[in-house]
Image (cartoon, grey):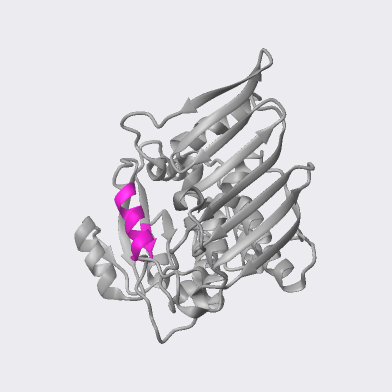
């Protein structure tokens, strides 16, 4: 690809997340969003007018046939991730796919197979890897400053935050799950990344639905549909074993009677030579020097451009340079395998061994 070529991108899904991508890619001069579509066409037309996008397509199938597009951003409900991503790869488009990669592990594996049959870039949009504090912790881990990472505790416990009650968010057949697949996937992905992408091999977990079925714990994200249904969890907890012997515990909720860390995401990294704590947008590094504990406060640099801008730029760089994204398809599959295993473990009450055969 010519070094100075502007990457032409189409957005499939003009809702909240699609709109975020439209805003962030404006800050990446090497790319331009030139087309958009949505199942609700007036929304796509409104976004096009708002962002100066020249072309609105009537369907994602029509958009994928646009020969001027190099890549697509897929920002649709979870159940449509796999069919659209597979169609996009088969149409010769590079793909930036919103999290979770798919509604379940089988669909994620289908995407992987389609990707392997193509020569295109497949990247999953896990922006938390690109947060300034998280990048600093990862840098120290890669330098060996923390030694061998053997245990991580991660979570995101919201007290009152069920989104869009009755919409696709709270229907298992459309979303694939509740807080576990919505916000838990962020903490799972970041944890596995900081742990050196060791492969998860077994899971023991439990899920609960104590708020949603009673129409309690409703948050402000999304508009409720009181004629809809709620058949997902509102809290999940799990212990995950990795192939290098390390362990990860994960706790997430949309609603719970707790003020745990003020409803912010958290992650505790424990290594043989040091550790790290991430709480919201703050972080600290820990070690022991001269027989005494020592720690370093981490901070976000002034005028930080933001995680999503770095993520967007990385996608464009991968297309131009033909390199594997940091959040590759296999990282997305790892997340889906663990999430599905947690649900299965909750149903059976047993430890679940992950099936990595693609």
| Placement of 337 over or under 331, stated as above or below | below
Q: Which residue is drawn at 44% across and 79% down?
A: 166
Q: Looking at the figure, which quarter contains the N terminus?
A: top left
Q: In which quarter of the image is residue 165?
A: bottom left
Is residue 85 in view? Answer: yes
Question: Residue 184 magenta-drawn?
Answer: no
- Does residue 328 appear anywhere in the picture? no
Residue 308 % position (x, y): 40, 45
Residue that protrudes farthest toward the bottom in the picture = 227
Where residue 138 sits: x, y (%)?
A: 57, 33
Residue at (57, 45) in percent of width and height: 190
Which residue sits furthest top? 290
What is the count of numbered marks?
0
- Magenta-highlighted residues: 10-24
Q: Which residue is drawn at 30% across and 42% down?
A: 27
Q: 54 and 133: which one is in front? A: 133
Viewer-closest of 219 and 332: 219
Majority secondary structure of magenta residues: helix
Q: Where is residue 150 in the image (x, y as percent from the top left)?
A: 73, 38
Give 241 or 99, whichever is nearer the viewer.
241
The C terminus, quarter of image: bottom right
32 left or right of 299 in image: left
Give the left or right position of residue 5, taking residue 48 as reference: right
Name which residue lies at 45% across and 50% down.
Answer: 262
Q: Where is residue 270 in the image (x, y as percent from the top left)?
A: 67, 35
Q: Is residue 195 left or right of residue 354?
A: left
């Amino acid at each position: 690809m010519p070094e100075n070529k502007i990457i032409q991108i189409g957005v499939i899904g003009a809702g909240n997340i699609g709109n975020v991508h439209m805003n962030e890619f404006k800050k990446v001069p090497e790319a331009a969003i030139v087309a958009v579509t949505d199942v609700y066409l007036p929304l796509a037309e409104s976004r096009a007018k708002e962002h100066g996008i020249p072309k609105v397509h009537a369907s994602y199938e029509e958009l994928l046939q646009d020969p001027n597009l190099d890549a697509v951003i897929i920002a649709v409900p979870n159940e449509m991730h796999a069919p659209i991503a597979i169609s996009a790869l088969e149409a010769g488009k590079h793909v930036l796919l919103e999290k979770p990669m798919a509604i379940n592990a089988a669909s994620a594996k289908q995407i992987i197979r389609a990707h392997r049959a193509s020569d295109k870039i497949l990247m999953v949009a896990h922006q938390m890897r690109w947060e300034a504090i998280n990048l600093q912790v990862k840098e120290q881990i890669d330098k060996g400053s923390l030694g061998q990472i053997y245990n991580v505790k991660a979570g995101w416990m919201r007290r009152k935050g069920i989104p869009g009650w009755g919409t696709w968010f709270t229907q298992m057949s459309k979303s694939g799950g509740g807080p576990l697949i919505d916000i838990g996937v962020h903490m799972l992905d970041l944890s596995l990344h900081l742990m050196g992408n060791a492969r998860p091999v077994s899971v023991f977990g439990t899920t609960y639905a104590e708020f949603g079925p009673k129409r309690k714990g409703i948050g402000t994200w999304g508009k409720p549909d009181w004629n809809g249904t709620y058949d997902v969890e509102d809290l999940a907890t799990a212990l995950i074993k990795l192939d290098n012997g390390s362990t990860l515990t994960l706790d997430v909720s949309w609603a719970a009677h707790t003020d745990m860390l003020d409803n912010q995401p958290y992650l505790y990294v424990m290594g043989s030579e040091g550790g790290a704590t991430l709480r919201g947008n703050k972080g600290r590094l820990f070690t022991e020097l001269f027989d005494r504990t020592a720690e370093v406060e981490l901070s976000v640099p002034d005028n930080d451009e933001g995680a999503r801008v770095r993520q967007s730029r990385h996608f464009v760089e991968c297309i131009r340079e033909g390199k594997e994204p940091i959040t590759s398809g296999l990282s997305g599959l790892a997340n889906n395998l663990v999430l599905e295993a947690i649900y299965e473990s909750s149903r059976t009450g047993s430890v679940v061994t992950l099936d990595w055969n693609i």
